[in-house]
Amino acid sequence: MTLAAGVAGSSPVLNIVIFLVFVAITLAIVVRVSRRAKGGASDFYTAGGGFTGQQNGIAISGDYLSAASFLGIAGAIALYGYDGFLYSIGFLVAWLVALLLVAELLRNTGRFTMGDVLAFRMRQRPVRAAAAVSTLVVSFFYLLAQMAGAGGLVALLLNVTSKAGQSLVIAVVGVIMIAYVLIGGMRGTTWVQIIKAALLIIGAAIMTFWVLAIYGFNFSALLGDAVAKGGEAGAKLLGPGAQYGKSGLTKLDFISLAIALVLGTAGLPHILMRFYTVPSAKEARRSVQWAIGLIGVFYLFTLVLGYGAGALVGPAAINAAPGKANSAAPLLAYALGGTVLLGLISAVAFATILAVVAGLTITASASFAHDIYANVIKKGAVDGKNEEVRVARLTAVVIGIVAILGGILANGQNIAFLVALAFAVAASANLPTILYSLFWKRFNTSGALWSIYGGLAITIVLIVFSPVVSGKKDAEGHLTASMIQGVDFHWFPLDNPGIVSIPLSFLLGYLGAVLSKDKADPALYAEMEVRALTGVNAVKSTVH
Amino acid sequence: MSTTDPSPPPEVRDWESVQSSPEFQDLRHRLRSFVFPVTGLFLAWYLLYVLLATYAPAFMSAKISGNITVGLIFGLLQFVSTFAITIWYVRFADRRLDPLATQLREELTDGEQK
């Protein structure tokens, strides 16, 4: 019955009004900051590297704390308890890989894209093409997850239950996102992410405080209530195993997921690109420091919110709601603050999707325009500075349309799960290549191609022939049912391919480099290493 | 490799001699001897946590006080260790890496301007 109240209590008109206010304010800011733009590729892709570490750190958390983090993790904790918490730990610890091994060296050796770093001492065209392909694939999975989340939210919050109506709203979200990217470039997108991060973290903080206040700031009492509300399954909420502990296979699947999460972050192209928006390696370090602080605190909030939703809303009501686990946080907002808080939190969740999608779009379009168009097709000879940006804008529109169509098709899939797949691809195809390029002298073009294409191919093949795509038994667990119903062509037993694909990609990168005849150029490695560590010749900020 | 143009564009600088200079080797050693062991450490600590959660659920579900379980404490310790390593590295980099990197960078840039 809480379900009926939850949906009926939501006022679609109020939700839409709050959301439109957010869009109007952010669009105004995007237009304002875009007037400061100087034009050219550097400005469009990286805002001329003119953000401070603090600003960029907040924007990174805005980019990273996607709908999957907010809705997905809170929902997973509400339904599966401790197993949901494991997601947030993997997502957080992963940042240490970025901080210690990647962020600063990447900032010093590249300009706009991941391809800049990977191609630094390799043959430009094949490596850039490979980097762009992998960027587009990772961004596509990530985009799908966000857009699918938008569809689920719409069902819950705006009372749009018809598929056509939901598709329309997904299209509107897509169009607004394209507008941000076209008008504001990286500068505008960054500000959208900063505003969104602030709203999301403040919103989560208020709800956390509220939930804790109800229990007299006694976390143990909150847990006790969540267990009591969980009925028979409640006792399992406090320890691991509710979601993944069923059999030897699901345990292995969990380990696979955990590995993909911790190694994926430092290979996500839209996160890597953010390090180019600051002027120096030191500011890149500050960015990650801020991001780790904000993201860590936010995940502590989701722990309280997840168990809070379990205790105050209850798993039965959450499971019965239109978006299932994804609706736990909005339902909790309604239980706490009624229609108004629900409206605010829904608007924040929409804003979250909008900002992340805009970040992904600009990354994917930069990669296509800079790596494929300017360097592979035009061989580095682009006529005039603005031609590349024109291509990037055009690509952004195409990606936006693909995202809208993909979102309509993926509507209803589990968001956290799709994001985990993007992490698996990033950890397999990108991370080994990045680490080898930065740290291994003998790494060469064929090594890079083997690890990118090999990692990509292995990961995608394993996903296609996994139970995620076909043949998952519903009775087996509460995970998403297969994408394609009614057929079974799976032979790979795990949902997440990370445990197989990541070590294999590292191995392929090694073998490709060792077995090929071409030798790595020691002079280029010397240049790359000196530049990476000292920051000499690094692209400077254009905003003084 | 050792030819130096009177006004070298950055690309033809003799990077290998910079790379083999003791100052640079010192910087490289400081960086690597920090980040590699620490990366190994936090990945092992994370993996230990994941394995315990997977194969020792009874231990992780044991209650310490009230409804607070061992697993919850372990999970929160992952947050603590992540924050601690971040602060540790930032201090290390600010004090032990930045001065050396800045000195090397300035030497290299001065050479360019003469």
Image (tube, rainbow, N blue to C red):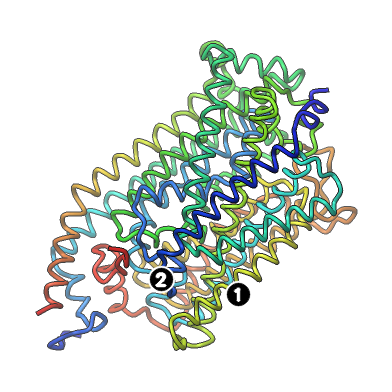
Disc with the residue nearer the chain's start (1 vs 2)? 2
Q: Is the residue at mark 1 from the same chain as the one at mark 2? A: yes
Screen quadrant of the C terminus of chain A: bottom left
Of residue A149 and residue A32, the one placed in the foreground of this image is A32
Query: Residue at position x 34%, y 45% from top?
Result: B38
Q: Which mark is residue A394?
A: 1
Q: Read off the residue under disc 2.
A: A42
Screen quadrant of the N terminus of chain A: top right
Asked if residue A273 can be seen in this view, the reply is no
Of residue A228 and residue A430, the one placed in the foreground of this image is A228
A212 left or right of A384 in image: right
Of residue A96 and residue A292, the one placed in the foreground of this image is A292
Residue A147 point in image, percent of width and height? 69, 53
A493 left or right of A69 in image: right
A465 left or right of A85 in image: right
Query: Residue at position x 60%, y 32% from top?
Result: B55
Query: Residue at position x 62%, y 35% from top?
Result: A344
Q: Chain of mark 1?
A: A
* Amino acid, disc 1: Leu
- Give the alpha-carbon distance from disc 1 to disc 2, as whole Å: 17 Å
A313 left or right of B102 in image: right
